[in-house]
Amino acid sequence: STMSWGSYFKGAQDFLSNASATSMLEKAKQAAQEVAEAANKVSETVQEEYRKTFVDLDCKIMQVREKLQVMEFPSEDKIDRLSARLNHDFAGRMMIFNMSERKYDTSKFQGEVVEVAFKGLPSPPLEMLLELCLSAHHWLSLDERNILVVHCFSGYQRSCVFLSCFMAFCAMAATAVDALHEVCTAVGVNDASDILPSQRRYLAYFQQVQQGIFPEVGRLHLLRMQINGLPKFESENNVIFRPYIEVWNGGGLIYTSLAPNETQPAASCSPDDTCAAFPFPEDAIVSGDVLIRVRHVHADGSKETALRFAFHTGFVADGLQLAKHELDSAAQDGRWSADSFLDLVFMRIAAGDDQDSIELPDTLSAVYEKACSVSRKLAAEEKKRQQNEQSAGASSSAKAVAEGGMDEFSELEEALRRAPGSTPTSDKPSASSPTTVLAPAAASASNVAPAAEKAPPAAPAAASMSDEITESGTQKERRKEEDEQNQKEQEQDQQQQQQKQQQQQQQKKQDEKSGVPDMDDLFNDFDAALASFDGGPAKKAPAPAASPSAPQTEAKKANGVGKKGDDDVFGDVDAFLADLDKS
């Protein structure tokens, strides 16, 4: 089709204008993007404040799993908002475990609230931990809409320990230790620093029970405890440490080295002391879950916990030695030396050894067996469910392959076979077959490279052994010559294709270097147009040899382009040259 000269120069003018405005456009885009990002941040902040104030009612309820949630302690200033949120979503379908050892108005919650009391211990006692898991599982199994909510008093460590054990109990995780990170992440607790060593010890106890390793029956007679590597709590009056010891068992205090009427311990430690020893009385006999705490008394009478540790008598051997990182409070206290450690010396009292010995009741043993049995059953059910899902997925994949006729590996192989540069495996034209190759854009239709009249014949199939035996020597030679000829034709076609691609790349690089695509052709056409006028400029720019624009020029002359009646041509020329001088 024909095109007026005005449109040629208008296109060139637009090209120069766009080139000069590119940097400005990019800067504008960048500025707009920065404004959009700032607006999004403001919007997110506003939405977060709105959600916190009007949706969450400025109180925290965090979801660990679909049916497991943790909330902050329902203090007097937040209990109405917490209960309003939970009652709105789960009225009559929630059970709340209160692990705070604090009382509050439970009637505000439209659900069952269970008081879980274990005074002083960092986690529920082992037997209670198992009972809570059985109770929570039973509650959730009654109705698929039921949920479990857990809370502590200060922080969420106790809640994290219990939910980690419960997830392992229900086969939501392989072990309680594996579940710990997920639970802590959901509630915003750093499991590496916020979970106490004693709490990790109980996670290990729980895992042993799941494996069928129950605590040994019996009691311990505490003999002596010694701290090696003393802390420096004070630096005046030649005193660094004023310790006293407490032993808790069965939810109560059974021994303390600080007499009721005394305000200061009987002995203190100086900088020259390297250890502190605490002998126990004859009646210091413990069983089950035990908490030992060492406290420091300041000069003004105030008290501070220096260390504490919890353990179960059924999971310790003939002695207990704990390093600094295994002691609560001391683990992250810089006043303790890095090589500080503690030794606890005791004697095991087997069942029936003395008249005061007490065997574990049958109901307590039944709790261990039932918890282990239920946990194993749930693990087997979860394993079967996962196997069924895998089988269903494999069946779906097989069905898709049968319907589609090709699996993902076959599709990949077919895609690679059809990729440019691959060798055709059939007589059908492939993407690399040199059937039709277009010349550069500036060439006319007459300069388009002719298509190959036919694709190279495919290599003949290998003859069978019987045919090869009966085949004459002349036929073999002719077949060999045909194969060589076909191979030579394919190589020539590939060379031609590579040459044409190199020509296209060179032409593209020249266009990019000049900044104006096909500018030589544009000036050649422009000179030809001027020459067609009577009295027009006699000087012409020398055209390159075999210029592909010659046929276009002749076609334009035949169609009357450039006659005297086209008065706007010179105006377009002047405008174009003026813009060119400015650029």
Image (tube, helix red, strand yellow):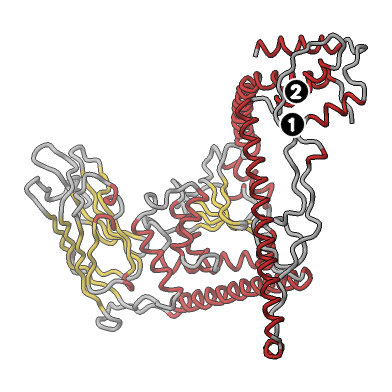
Q: Residue furthest left?
A: 272
Between 568 and 47, which is closer to the camera in this rendering? Answer: 568
Amino acid type for the residue under numbered disc 2: Asn
Does the image show residue 95? no
Amino acid type for the residue under numbered disc 1: Ser
| Residue name at image x 21 percent, y 74 percent | 347
The residue that label 2 is drawn on is 524
| Residue name at image x 87 percent, y 25 percent | 556
Q: Residue 342, image x and y in percent?
A: 20, 59
Above-or-below relation of 369 to 143: below
The residue that label 1 is drawn on is 547
Which quadrant holds residue 126?
A: bottom left
| Upstream in sequence: badge 1 or badge 2 | 2
Above-or-below relation of 554 to 404: above
Between 234 and 193, which is closer to the camera in this rendering? Answer: 193
Between 354 and 186, which is closer to the camera in this rendering? Answer: 186
| Residue name at image x 68 percent, y 14 percent | 580
Which quadrant holds residue 334?
A: top left
Q: Residue 1, image x and y in percent?
A: 89, 31
Q: Is 8 displayed left or right of 250 in the figure?
A: right
Q: Residue 4, image x and y in percent?
A: 87, 21
Does the image show residue 157? yes
Q: Residue 346, image x and y in percent?
A: 21, 70
Between 156 and 453, which is closer to the camera in this rendering? Answer: 453
From the image, which quarter does the C terminus lie in? top right
Q: Is 123 displayed left or right of 504 in the figure?
A: left
Above-or-below relation of 82 to 473: above
Give how far apart the Cα atoms at labels 1 and 2 are. Answer: 9 Å
